[in-house]
Image (cartoon, grey):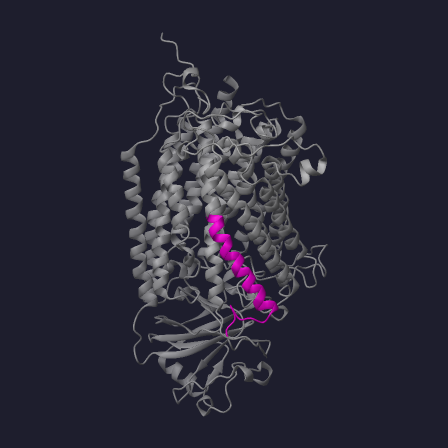
Amino acid sequence: MSAHAHTLEVSEAPTGFISKYIFSTDHKVIGIQYFLLGLTSVVIGVLLSVLMRIHLAWPAGKMPFLQGGIMTQAQYLSLVTMHGTLMAFFVLTTAPQSGFGNYFLPLQIGAPDMAFPHLNMLSFWMTFLGLVCLISAFFVPDGAPISGWTAYTPLSGIGQITGPGEGYGQTMWILSIACFCIGSLMGSLNFIATTIDMRAPGMSLFRMPLTCWGWFITAVLMLLAFAVLLAGAILLLLDRSLGTSFFLPAGIVVNDQLQHHAGGSPLLWQHLFWFFGHPEVYIAILPGLGVTSHVISTFCRKPIFGYREMVFANIAIGTLGFMVWGHHMFVSGMNPYSGFAFSLMTMSIGVPSAIKTFNWISTLWGSKIHFDTPMLFAIGFVSLFVSGGLSGLFLAQPAVDNLLHATYYVVAHFHLVMGVAALFGVFAATYFWFPKMFGRMMNPTLGKIHFWITFVGAYCIFMPMHFLGLVGGIRRYADYSAIAYLQPLRPLTMFVSIAAFVTAAAQLIFLFNFFWSLKHGAVAGKNPWKATTLEWTTDSPPPRDDFGGHDPSVYRGPYEFSVPGAREDFIPQNLEPAQVAREEQS
Amino acid sequence: MSTNEHRSRWAASLFSALLILLVVATVYVFVSGKYAPPAAITAAGRAIDHQYHLTLAVTAAVFVLSQLGLAFVVFRYQDHGQKVQFSRGNNTLQLLWTSLTAVLFIGLGLLGGKAWATGRMFTLSPDAVRIEVTENQFVFNFRYAGPDGKFGRLDPSQINASLANPLGLDSADPAGNDDIVVPTLTVPVNQEIELLLRSQDVIHSFFVRELRLQQDAVPGLVVPLRFKAEKLGHYEVVCTQLCGLGHSNMHTYLDIVSQANFDAFLKNGGQ
């Protein structure tokens, strides 16, 4: 049990616009800043994917804003790169973890702020700087890089000569990633310190909501993973600008020109990148796993089934997540024996993932489900997590990977499980916590329309992609015209594009609902969902020091719903045992 | 909560219906075989297909049971005023599904290792045909050792595509004089082949669906790739590793020919 940290004296709430909303040290403001950064990035990222889908559906179609009208291969590949980078880093890492985690970790564990408020502010502004660097890659000479979000070297490591965008554009990309790493490292330290040191009296680790467990384990993953990526990014920058050869072997000839490098290894970059890159998948999804558990329990009015098993499954996923990076490299030239070892570790990650799924379904079993919008997204998350996770069992086997590697099957797999599922976690969190953050409810009808279109749309986009991949449809191809066996795939490609347009358009409903409800939503009150955790015991939105000057104490676990003998179907964590209203004996 | 109950009913029905539709549609497409790779033309490829189908059976079972299970609980336990069956968990169930999935998934992984070994870990017969594959932006070149059975030395500084020396054959090494360099791959049927994959500039890849073989070509490495094709034919070879501007145009062909035709091919210097 931790002692409550009384050392943090929260001063008077700032009144000036800049200190209150821009350079704020308030974890709630910083959480919203991260959320808005994620929202901006996701809007740009989705627009880029819509452009890609237009090009794939109508390769000869004219786009009025492009020079020459028709999208070039280089432009297509730069969209691929920027879409992946924006989504993986600036959306899937920032919104679920840095956004909602910042806002709700202190509130859920009963703390007045994060452990290091100024560091928190610095983390956000480093991340913001990273986004500025990334977007600026569009505007430097020759445009954005074309090497994909994985930036495999030598394509990314030599410079302009390997392709358009590989000059200034790639440099801006690396600087952006470096800034993002630094911001994430500072942020993760803050999350870890806060979780360990700032819990309210009575808030033992095993009384923490599963959301907090998600953020905590994610923070540990970020600390270990982004440190390695930062080192890799710096080495890549040195290769490009100072002529070192960390990732470049001797004898490279580009355009008949011999490059003066020697001694490095392109596979080293892949190892460093994927040592970050695979945990990154779990960084994106672990907060969503937490939110899903939290929302499911709350809206089915039943304790989460197997709370401890859920926590241990998260820890297992986080731990195993660091031992599987090699499954991205089965056909990279890595020793086949290593491939086999990585394969077995990867298959075992299926076990804790399955445990989570079975526990969610068991939680719903015998419950009383309220189908509010957050719950729809949480149940949708479970379905997507199952679909996207199971296709991973194919890719986890190097033999089968021979056929599926670098095809749309891979694109389908990771979009379902780390893209769409993680975004469903973000949507569930947004609809769930919006009333706490802004004091008003989001419109439930618009929320439901948004859900149904997005749920059906996401499956219509990504299920067919598995079939594209099975037949050999190769990802990151701007143009299918050169390969004869890709021609029969055109109708399916068209179907995917149309599903993508509809689904993307449906997100406007969400955006409208979000901004409209800020002003016009129904007033929420303290606890509109009849939830149990600490954030629902304070005002909506909470005051600057979260709990208005009094420190909450915690008497029980986070999911006390429909407890036999209690009059209400929920018992807040901070309610003293003597105050729990009993059912009258009849 | 009468309005809530009302809303529950159609939301629960729609949700279950969609999940059932998802299961039916997915199973239908797989069973119909409409989207399946072409038949494998090697024994190792068939071992991969076998493992693929085994994995498909296991994942299909888990997929169908989980999605239908979800559909069932969503429909059955919508709020119609019932009493919640209070529970915090069940150790027997946890133990059961943990051990069951562990055996299933890790067992599958072990079997998968066998299929991997069939294609990637075996001793090559001494009379295997060795062909060097060199990739650069955005072409393939295939080199045969010629009558002397020896590959000539390469010197990167002599690489010059426009002067017809795309590989940089060292003019000082006589072993290279009879080397055959061609832009498409021709191999004899029923004969062990070892490709030696190289790249001059960035990372490329070599992928033939019918061989069930995909392998990156990495600068600084020579990666062996072995197969024994059992069927004559003309197949497409593509690059699957993002290699720059012309990535989606980078392809060539694999011709699997009879031994007699292959001998003639070599004799005619790759014509």
| Above or below for B215 versus A308 | below
Q: Which residues are magenta?
A: A221-249
**Horizontal side of residue A302 vs A69, given as left or right:** left
Residue B118's spot in the image, x, y percent? 31, 65
Above/below status of B172 relative to B201? below
Image quadrant of residue A332? bottom left
Give the image quarter of residue B124: bottom left
Q: Does the magenta portion include B259?
A: no
Residue at 58%, 82% (x, y): give it. Answer: B160
Residue A299 on image: x %, y %: 47, 27
Residue lying farthest to the top in this orientation? A586
Asked if residue A550 lies left or right of residue A582, the reply is right
* A359 on left or right of B96: right
- Total numbered labels placed on residues in the image: 0
Residue A219, percent from left and from top? 48, 45
Q: How far from the left and from the top, in percent, is residue A552?
A: 50, 25
The answer to whether any part of residue A56 appears in the image is no
Q: Main secondary structure of the magenta part?
A: helix
Nearer to us in this view, A375 or A265: A265
Of residues A348 and A382, the one nearer the viewer is A348
Pick the front one: B189 or A192: A192
Q: Would you say B192 lies left or right of A486 here?
A: left
Q: Residue at x 58, y 48 (%)?
A: A90
Judge whether residue B112 can be spotted in this image: yes
